[in-house]
């Protein structure tokens, strides 16, 4: 049983695993830092503590970003999308957001699949 | 059988439905417009045609953004994340990105779950 506000819990459209998608954006740069997943309790803790908190699909448990790395996220704003299955989380990120050490999870030449056309 | 480059197809970590998550960002504003899903063929078409193309989980088929609304997306850049299960798609968006008529799928007072703290 999660502490999530029951009205919000009724609105959420969770996937088969009971999760909503969380897109995490850096407040100061508007860069997309990472994509993670939240169950009701992760969303509840994110909203009430302003620490980015997610559900690890591989470990099957809640995790707070930075709990081991120190690369914590202070949550500035949270929005739900029109389908109620995705949240947009604006954060102040301490240190790199990616566990590989890059600022975002999309940085690096090997992660570029299609480059912008020359002007 | 998709036309996707076999090397890229080998890298992708698809979910149980064979899909990767697609976060769509507006190139000119860096706003997150929407989140959708891609199978291999949707990614292949997005990369080769530069039109935002997705897989509809509800309809069980490919769709090109704007094919009925005219609100097409010209794709500027595509990046894969560190887990190879999410792509970040930068687009030039014609018209509103959201089917409800708002510019992004996260706009509207009823979609705000947590407001920024006063400075």
Image (spheres, coloured by chain):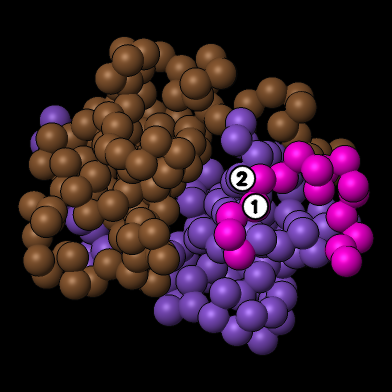
Chain colours: A brown, B purple
* Residue A3 painted magenta: no
Which label sits on residue B85? Answer: 2
**Quick one: B40 or A18, which is closer to the camera?**
A18
Question: Magenta span covers which residues?
Answer: B1-17
Structural crowding at the residue carrying mark 1, measured as other residues with C-alpha within 10 Å and reported as few (<14), some (14–19) or many (≥20): some
Residue A93 pos. (x, y %): 36, 23
Quadrant of image for the C terminus of chain B: top left
Which residue is painted at 88% across and 66% down in the image?
B1
- Placement of A106 over or under A42, stated as above or below: above
Which residue is painted at 32% across and 27% down in the image?
A65
Q: Secondary structure at mark 1?
A: loop
Q: Answer yes or no: do the residues labelled 1 and 2 have beta carbons within 8 Å? A: yes
By secondary structure, the bulk of the magenta-drawn segment is best described as loop
Q: Which corner quadrant of the image does residue B59 belong to? A: bottom right
A83 vs A110, left or right, is left
Q: Which corner quadrant of the image does residue A25 belong to? A: top left
Residue A117 pos. (x, y %): 84, 43
Which residue is painted at 54% across and 68% down in the image?
B97
List the residue tagged with mark 1: B14
- Placement of A76 over or under B42, stated as above or below: above
Residue A85 pos. (x, y %): 38, 64
């Amino acid at each position: 049983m999660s502490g999530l506000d029951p009205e919000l819990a009724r609105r959420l459209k969770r996937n088969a695993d009971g999760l909503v998608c969380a897109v995490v954006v850096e407040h100061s740069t508007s860069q997309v830092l990472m994509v993670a997943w939240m169950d009701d309790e992760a969303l509840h803790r994110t909203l009430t503590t302003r620490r980015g908190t997610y559900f690890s699909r591989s470990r099957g448990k809640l995790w707070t970003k930075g709990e081991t790395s120190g690369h914590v996220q202070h949550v500035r704003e949270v929005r739900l999308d029109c389908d109620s299955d995705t949240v947009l989380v604006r954060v102040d990120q301490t240190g790199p957001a990616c566990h590989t050490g890059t600022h975002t999870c999309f940085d690096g030449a090997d992660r570029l699949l299609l480059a912008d056309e020359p002007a």
